[in-house]
């Protein structure tokens, strides 16, 4: 079997241990930048994966991440931030990491070989045909990730695989294969570095595009955020202010009237009759703000037109 890129020696690695600190750090930084750049080649498949994620969420399914080791931490970082950033309900997201909760304290290597644990994790999560399972593995051959995806596919789930080596066994189990062909690591095989950086970028891109598809972003603003602390409440009011042109105090009043829901507050500012009317309008547009705003503007125009007709 040919040596995997993630296990090969980087061109800057020779004599690394006897180089001055600034040379070592420059090599590490350059390798990270090079790894990040590799994500661009995967954009077409990342786009397909994001659409699949959005479709499953829109259809009532869940996003289920499955991974081991450093890849598991990248999955954890992406998954845990989705509720706060985009308002995706926490029960619509599950994280299967080799070693379970213990891995958050002791990231041992053994569990990544445990295919039985992977099978049990998929079963315990109740994975079904409505769900989307995203498996991540730098090598693309981690037994836990491969088996989790295999079992999920057998249960009818949609499957996405992210790996950093071509011809990865993980891709054989996936509906969408995302290859991020990062260069060898400066510390050979230490995929917490370049490969992990690239995985995090790809995951962030996928979940953000999925959120855009779901209507959770408007002009670069996170309009479906969960404002559960002072910073986010302030951000919510600033978003309402930026989109509507209303003052900050008025934005805060509007948010209070609609339970902190940014989209609803914006529609109230735009002329919706009530918070309930704004929510109904959003239901009719698939939770997308732009067409809801257009509908309000259209109704205003029609009302003006009717008024002119009645006067003539």
Image (spheres, rainbow, N blue to C red):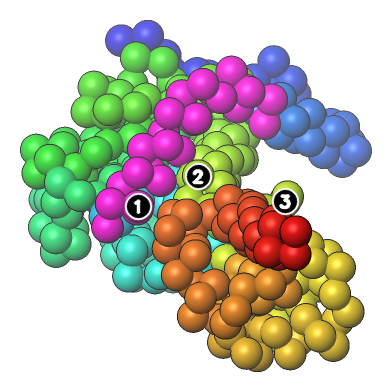
**Residue at 49% across, 65% down:** 281
Q: Are marks 3 and 2 in contact (CB under 8 Å)?
A: no
- Point out the residue furthest to the top here: 2
Quarter of image, res 246:
bottom right
User: What is the magenta range?
Assistant: 36-60
Q: CA distance from mark 3 to mark 2?
A: 13 Å
**Residue at 27% across, 27% down:** 175
Quarter of image, res 2:
top left
Whether residue 296 is visible: yes
User: Residue 253's x, y, as percent?
Assistant: 74, 90
* Magenta residues, dominant SS class: helix
Confirm whether the magenta stretch covers residue 95. Answer: no
20 or 287: nearer the eye?
A: 287
User: Which residue is under mark 3?
Assistant: 220
Confirm whether the magenta stretch covers residue 47. Answer: yes
Q: Are marks 2 and 1 in contact (CB under 8 Å)?
A: yes
Is the residue marked by circle 2 packed among few (<14), some (14-19), or many (20+) residues within 10 Å?
some
Q: CA distance from mark 3 to mark 1?
A: 21 Å
User: Which residue is under mark 1?
Assistant: 58
Going from N to C along the chain, the mark reached first, 3 or 2, is 2
Residue 258, relative to residue 98: is it above or below? below
């Amino acid at each position: 079997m040919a040596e995997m890129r993630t296990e090969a020696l980087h061109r800057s690695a020779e004599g690394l241990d006897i180089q001055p600190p600034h040379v070592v750090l420059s090599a590490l930084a350059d390798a990270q930048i090079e790894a990040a750049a590799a994500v661009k080649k995967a954009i077409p498949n990342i786009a397909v994966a994001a659409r699949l994620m959005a479709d499953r969420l829109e259809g009532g399914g869940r996003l289920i991440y499955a991974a081991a080791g450093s890849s598991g931490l990248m999955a954890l970082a992406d998954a845990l931030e989705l509720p706060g950033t985009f308002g995706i309900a926490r029960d619509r997201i599950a994280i299967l990491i080799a070693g379970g909760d213990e891995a958050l304290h002791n990231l041992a290597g053994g569990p990544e070989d445990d295919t039985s644990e992977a099978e049990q994790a998929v079963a315990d999560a109740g994975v079904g045909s409505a769900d989307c399972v995203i498996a991540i593995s730098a090598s693309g051959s981690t037994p836990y990730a491969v088996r989790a995806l295999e079992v999920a596919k057998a249960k009818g789930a949609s499957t996405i695989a992210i790996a950093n080596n071509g011809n990865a066994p993980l891709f054989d189990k996936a509906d969408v294969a995302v290859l991020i062909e990062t260069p060898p690591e400066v510390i050979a095989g230490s995929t917490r570095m370049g490969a992990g950086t690239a995985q995090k970028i790809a995951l962030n891109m996928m979940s953000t595009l999925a959120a855009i598809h779901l209507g959770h972003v408007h002009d670069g603003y996170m309009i479906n955020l969960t404002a559960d602390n002072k910073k986010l409440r302030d951000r919510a009011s600033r978003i309402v202010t930026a989109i509507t042109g209303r003052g900050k105090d008025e934005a805060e009043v509007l948010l209070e009237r609609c339970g902190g829901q940014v989209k609803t507050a914006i529609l109230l500012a735009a002329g919706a009759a009530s918070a309930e009317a704004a929510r109904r309008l959003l239901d009719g547009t698939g939770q997308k703000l732009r067409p809801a705003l257009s509908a309000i503007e259209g109704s205003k125009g029609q009302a003006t037109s009717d008024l002119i007709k009645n006067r003539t």
